[in-house]
Amino acid sequence: MKNTFIFNQFDMVVSMTQQTINDQLTHLLRTGTIHSSFILAQVIENNNYVYKVLDDESQIPPNSAYINASILPQVNISSSGLDITFVLNMLSGTAAFWIGNGPLSRLTTFDIDNWSYGIDVNMDLFKLEQDDIGKKITVPPLVEDQLKNFTDKMFSVNSLLMDFESVDLIQFNPTHTNAGKSGDVGIEQMVLFMQFYLKWLIASGNPYVLGYAINQTDQSEVPTNEVVPDPLKPVGTTYSMYCDAVTPAKSNLNFVLATKGGFGHISGSPGTFDTNWIGDNEDINAKMIISHTDLVESLILKPLYESLQTSVFSQINGNIDVSSGNSYENGKALTATGISYTISNVNSGDDQYVNTMNVTLNNQATSVDIVVKGHIQLYKEVDKNMGLCTAKAHAGGTVDWTGKFSIEATKDELGNPTLKLTQSTTIDNCTSDSDKNDCAKAFEWIGKILGTILDLITLGLDQGFFSKLFEDLMDLHIPNIGNIGAAFGNISNAVRTTILLPGGQVFYFKTPSIDTEGNFYLQLTYKSEN
């Protein structure tokens, strides 16, 4: 699937590299959120084998099978699609397994040296029940504290890696399982041990080893400067993996999100991406991609289109006999460099009204430029038999204009990264033309019609008209936020509040960019740029 086709069903993607995930798992190990040792013993109780997780190797009962290992959990994305492999690396230690059957069985000890156990986990959360904090699984205090710092209540949190109770989503992966010199017997025994380990995680506290997608609700209490528009407010998530065969560390787990003002909910499973969202030369932890519909169009292009359409038509209505033109959806068309808009294209006859915009989307070093080239053409012709003579007259003209929106990565007063939106307009060319025969000159009402059209071109659509149009757009009110400039300033908060890493950190963004469809990209790092 072409990557951007995802926006036919979803609103946002956050692509997190395999390397970032594994660095975070190592961080969780250092902080004690994930236990650094794994001591599991097989004991007999009531004539049945049971497994016990122990705190210290001295607690291993005599004459018992066991695993006593220092561990490092990691993930491996070995294929694109819905599965990710969770690998429990056993770095060192000892293990004892019963070899043989019946009276001939012997408890045999093995040195653990870089053993590993892998399980494939299906990440299609469309089929997986979502869990709230504290509903089933204990959330690590380090992560829970970070969540509470963000908001006090009413947040739902999805497990990103696995719900171990959903056993149909888990499958043993022999490719990433290795028991060294213990061979097939060791692998067989390790599989039994690990089945218990998965059940134990449920009781002891699953650390959601990949991270959190934070879903805002209407009851969420968020500071005003952290409120984002509904099209950027996540309400649900599912996942898709991308395997980068050339650079495995850049293989990624993709958070695929629906937003409140976008699709509103997760309506199905995501497809498989054709290419890596993260480029070969991008040294980043992750990337956020926002659908053209939810950001550039929702906050800039659609309001501009509708404002221009309304403003011009209100001035020609009653003088030029035309309709207001196309709806936004019907007037839009993609081009090789951006988007073209046809508000109206009545270019023949006595009443003519052409109003078009061509949008070019350009990437600069630290900013994105949205350049709008507009063309307006008006024409009115009067041809009427007045009895003694035929009155003929016409008036018309054109206005060519340019507007530019720049979205620049900068810093706020606290040194945090933010986006700054600026705008400018210019009149590139303005022409007018009119004529009337002697018969028409005798009738005042014809002069008034022509005068209105000429005044509109020479006075109404001058620099002041477009400057005011763009200024009004910048002041466009967004409920609970303010103007469009404030909305872009709060996008940095959207980044910090959309994805929380398993270690408790949050992402900051770096360089913005845009593609020819208008999809908006932000490079992400979990290292503060302060």
Image: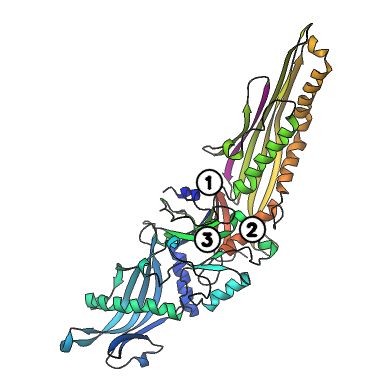
Q: Is residue 442 visible?
A: yes
Which kind of residue does numbered mark 3 sit on? Gly
Q: Residues within 10 Å of mark 1 (few under 14, many from 20)?
A: some
Q: Earlier in the sequence, mark 2 or mark 1?
A: 2
Q: Is residue 355 magenta?
A: yes
State the SS at label 1. loop
* Residue 272 location (% of width, % of height): 40, 53
Q: Residues within 10 Å of mark 2 (few under 14, many from 20)?
A: many
Outermost residue on the front side: it is 387
State the SS at label 3. strand
Q: Is residue 321 magenta?
A: no
Outermost residue on the top side: it is 388
Q: Is residue 120 visible?
A: no
Q: How many marks?
A: 3
Residue 372 has which mark?
none
- What is the C-alpha distance between the residues marked 2 and 1? 22 Å
Outermost residue on the left side: it is 104
User: Which residue corresponds to mark 2?
Assistant: 228
State the SS at label 2. loop
Q: Which residues are magenta?
A: 351-362
Which kind of residue does numbered mark 2 sit on? Val
- What is the C-alpha distance between the residues marked 2 and 3? 16 Å
Along the line of sight, the residue nearer the viewer: 418 or 133: 133
Residue 236 has which mark?
3
User: Which residue corresponds to mark 1?
Assistant: 515
Along the line of sight, the residue nearer the viewer: 173 or 216: 216
Q: Nearer the viewer, mark 1 or mark 3?
A: 3
